[in-house]
Image: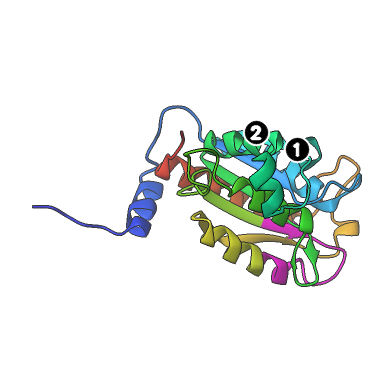
């Protein structure tokens, strides 16, 4: 008898059984800000350490190393994908999950992050544009000096990532009043926030292990 289960049921059952895949799940982490003292970069760095502790293999990158002009269809038609976009497509494809630390700009995500997502979503030759995203597990978070903790921006980010075909975890990591949230080493000071980071990292690692999608 054939038993049909939903994707969500499969994922949840796999998490409960801690279903293994070969090796540790590879988790890519990035910040939507390249500002020198960015709170979101600190959050991404803290999450990278926490992902390692949760049993994942963390790859922390800076978008400053992948410069790209603002997306323009005429430029794409004339010159094709920037090499940075190809490199990021390869990184996304080679990882099981991604953590995005996003600033909030006018109740949305940063222009840098949106531009990156747009370029990476473009087709590369015969390979469809959304291939780097489809079926990958995403966790999202953000830090801000205000009280909102980037909640409105993360709502938009969830919509964008879901539209790209990613499985976005329901929990988010929000850091309000970020100016006082990190210690001198750039790590979260609050025990409550550390616990939230650990819970999100564990969920990301376990879900990525269960889904086990990677090129």
Q: Is residue 113 left or right of residue 181?
A: left
Residue marked by disc 1: 66
Which residue is nearer to you in this view: 85 or 124? Answer: 124
Sequence-wise first label, 1 or 2: 1
Residue 148 lies in the magenta-colored region: yes
Which residue is nearer to you in this view: 152 or 19? Answer: 152
Badge 2 element:
helix
Image coords of residue 134 (percent x, y): 47, 49
Where 6 sits versus 36, above or below? below
Image coords of residue 118 (percent x, y): 65, 53
Q: Residue at x 46, y 33 (%)?
A: 215
Image coords of residue 51 (percent x, y): 62, 40
State the mark number for residue 143: none
Q: Is residue 4 left or right of residue 161?
A: left
Q: Residue at x 40, y 33 (%)?
A: 21
Which residue is nearer to you in this view: 64 or 184? Answer: 64
Image coords of residue 49 (percent x, y): 69, 37
Pointers 1 and 2 in contact (CB under 8 A)?
yes
Residue 44 lies in the magenta-colored region: no
Q: Which residues are magenta?
A: 141-154
- Residue count near mark 1 (Cα–Cα under 10 Å), binned few <14, some 14–19, many ≥20: some
Q: Residue at x 36, y 47 (%)?
A: 14
Considering every residue shown, the one lying at the far top of the view is 23
Residue marked by disc 2: 87
């Amino acid at each position: 008898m054939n038993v049909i289960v939903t994707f969500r049921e499969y994922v949840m059952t796999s998490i409960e059984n801690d279903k293994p895949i070969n090796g540790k799940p590879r988790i890519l982490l990035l910040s939507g800000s390249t500002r020198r003292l960015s709170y979101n970069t600190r959050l991404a760095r803290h999450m990278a350490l926490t992902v390692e502790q949760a049993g994942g293999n963390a790859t922390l990158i800076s978008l400053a190393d992948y410069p790209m002009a603002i997306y323009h269809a005429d430029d794409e038609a004339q010159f094709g994908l920037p090499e940075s976009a190809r490199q990021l497509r390869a990184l996304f494809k080679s990882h099981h999950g991604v953590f995005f630390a996003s600033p909030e700009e006018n109740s949305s995500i940063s222009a840098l992050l949106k531009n990156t997502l747009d370029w990476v979503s473009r087709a590369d030759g015969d390979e469809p544009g959304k291939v780097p995203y489809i079926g990958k597990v995403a966790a999202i978070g953000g830090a801000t000096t205000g009280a909102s903790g980037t909640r409105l921006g993360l709502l938009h980010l969830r919509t964008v990532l879901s539209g790209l075909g990613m499985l976005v975890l329901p929990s988010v990591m929000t850091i309000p009043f970020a100016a006082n949230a990190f210690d001198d080493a750039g790590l979260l000071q609050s025990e409550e926030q550390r616990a939230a980071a650990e819970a999100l990292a564990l969920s990301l690692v376990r879900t990525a292990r269960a889904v086990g999608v990677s090129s």
